[in-house]
Image: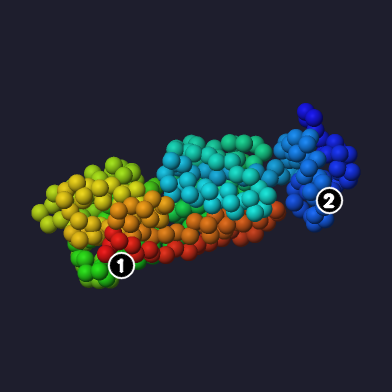
Amino acid sequence: MAGARLKDVAARAGVSIKTVSNVVRGQARVAEPTRQRVLRAIAELDYRPNASARHLRTGRSGVIALAVPELVQPYFAELATAVINAARAHDVSVLIEDTGGDPAAELRVACGLSDPLIDGVLLSPQRLDQATLARRERRVPLVLLGERDYEVAADHVLIDNVLAAQEATAHLLAGGCRRIAAVGFQSDPLLTTSQQRARGYLKALHSAGVPYDPDLTPPVPAYTRTDGMTAMRTLLALPEPPDAVFCFSDLLASGVVRAAHDAGRSVPGDVAVIGFDDVEETRFSIPSLSTVAPDKPQLARLAVDALLARVAGDAEAPHTTVYAAHRLLARESSG
């Protein structure tokens, strides 16, 4: 039946419209035989809930947006999957937005302009500055993800990047390495992933009494395999190449390992390598890559729960910064 309505499903299943609504929304206990009867009627009539009507009726659509800088990046793809799974537990759908790191696109999503029916936004900003974000006009519920330091009216979910980077560098120091390079330095102050992980790297060197050598921190334009390979070639051309490399992402580390291989250097025999993000490919590379593993499922759950709490009416509650867990995974690449 084209354009079947709730009352059509109710008539087919022999139940009330309220019962059908409860089954569709999953918001009340319905006897299992009744629920199955309603689900059969929904399938037979090809009933599709009308999001616009639901929004008018309840003020909510059951849809949230997740905006990330680059969905092609494995970390963001895996995070998006974790967010979808976390939202599904609340019977909420997720609209994925790839902003390309464009501040105008990031602001558009933060204002809820990507879709007028969304209930709220999870945003991982890359270049959106604090002053612009604070002036956003449409105040849809917003939760920030990632390393950016913002003092705005929004909850923020992240891991402790400084501590994680410090632990990664300390792991290499504990293995006896002393000329430890860092691949991931970027000068743009808006790129705070670089700023925070660099801070952790420097703290670990300082704690171990190892002097900082700027030659061991070649800048990179982006966090890609190609950029990692280029940086490693620069490091290997030094009169005294590094004996270890801490990479600010696993993609950078992949390029670093490839450049070492092309130069006839053994990993970890000649140079130890550790990455950051624990994307799936790191477990299957040769050698398997040591890395910092953010708890992506926990990040997703914390973010979705915070956003849905705001959607449910906690708009005036104090905004919070919540840290998810991370752990260091020592694999073959660091010995």
The numbered mark at residue 34 is 2
Query: Which quarter of the picture shows residue 204?
Result: bottom left
Q: Is residue 305 visible?
A: yes
Q: Amino acid at mark 2?
A: Thr
Secondary structure at badge 1 equals helix
Residue nearer the viewer, 2 or 21: 2
The amino acid beneath tag 1 is: His
Cα separation, mark 1 vs mark 2, equals: 57 Å
Rendered residue at 74%/44% (across/down): 59
Instruction: Please give left or right for residue 179 compared with residue 165 in the image.
Output: left
Tell me, for residue 171, which label it has, or none: 1
Residue 9, position in %: x, y? 83, 39
291 relative position to 24: left or right = left
- Tell me the crowding category of disc 2: few under 14, some 14 to 19, or many 20 or more residues within 10 angstroms, Cα based: some
Mark 1 vs mark 2: which is more N-terminal?
2
Q: Position of residue 326 (x, y in %)?
A: 44, 63
